[in-house]
Image (tube, rainbow, N blue to C red):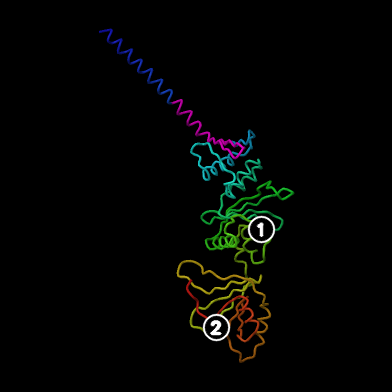
Amino acid sequence: MKGDIKKKIAIIIIIGLFLIAFLTCGFIYFLKDNTHKDSGVYDIKVNDDIIKVYQDKIIVNDDNLNYSYDSVQKFIKFIDNNFDDKSKRINIDYNALDDYQTLVIDDILNKKNEEEFITSVEDYIYSIYLSYEDNNYIIYLKDNNLVHVKKVSLSDDKLNIIDIEEAYNLDFSKDSNAEIVDYIKSLFNDNREVNRLYKDSVTSDEERFINSIINNDEDYLKNRDDVYTLKYSGLNCLTPVLYLYPDNTYEYYYTFTTADKKPTPINGVYSVNIEDLINLSLNNPEDYTVNYILTGQGNTYFIDASLDLVNMLLSETNATLGTCLVQE
């Protein structure tokens, strides 16, 4: 009887030892595997270069880039979003990279300073590198029509970004933000294959957009107190409107919409001097026919269609005012 008890105890002890050993091995394996995962390590090969990425550092060919934790996390997110990282070992074909991927990978391989990397790794739909009034900015149009801006300092040779002075998202009303988004997209209309451009000149009709962006102030979009409007007189319907701005740009609205959105105007530049047109209207004979009404700066002027200057203005703007609005 005692022998059976001892035998059972021995069996229980042996089973317990095996169970402890099994659980210990499993725990060690689990700990090792999760330590590897938590370290966030990637082994990336780009041609003959090796990039090792940990949660808190990036090693390029055995050199530590000394990036901050936040920048390392940005690079990890970049890898996650752009490459198959299931195995944590990635072979990258440099020649197959798109422009955005090339820019980021080049910064890493060339061991660029952290400020340069931060501007490159920012995800975007379009980006504009702007030089304006002795300052430099990068304007990003991101998902959901978010506009992000970085004001940066350049090296003496203008080739490298050495500091990010300021970074912010535009905080505009829905309509104003849409106006900025439309402006940014218009810069890429001529080449839809490009999503990054360098801009070192700003035309007069662009100034209100640029000033609103770099000052994060939508009031620049509304700063057109000297605007004149030209309309046709005599039709029993809503007619087109020609907006004439002091910077010699115009907006021609000839449509209406049923949705909750602003009609899309035709934009351009005109050369007619509005003051000359006003003076001619004031000198018209008393029996002239009122065809157009010019309004601005609190005054209203009646314009005869026979005036060469008004016909020149309508020709320059391709505006047909003597008609009803059409649905957009």
Report the span colored magenta.
27-56
Secondary element at image label 2: loop
Horizontal side of 260 relative to 150 (left or right) equals left
Residue 127 disc label: none
Residue type at the position of mark 1: Lys
Q: Nearer the viewer, residue 267 or 294?
A: 267
Earlier in the chain: of badge 1 and badge 2, it is 1
The label nearer to you, 1 versus 2, is: 1
Which residue does the numbered mark 1 point to in the structure image? Answer: 199
Residue type at the position of mark 2: Ser
- Seen as rendered, the residue at the extreme right is 156
The CA distance from mark 1 to mark 2 is 43 Å
Which residue does the numbered mark 2 point to in the structure image? Answer: 233
Quarter holding the N terminus is top left
Q: Position of residue 95 (x, y in %)?
A: 59, 46
Q: Nearer the viewer, residue 221 or 255?
A: 255
Secondary element at image label 1: strand
Total count of labels: 2
> Any magenta on residue 36?
yes
For disc 1, the neighbor class at 10 Å (few under 14, some 14 to 19, many from 20) is some
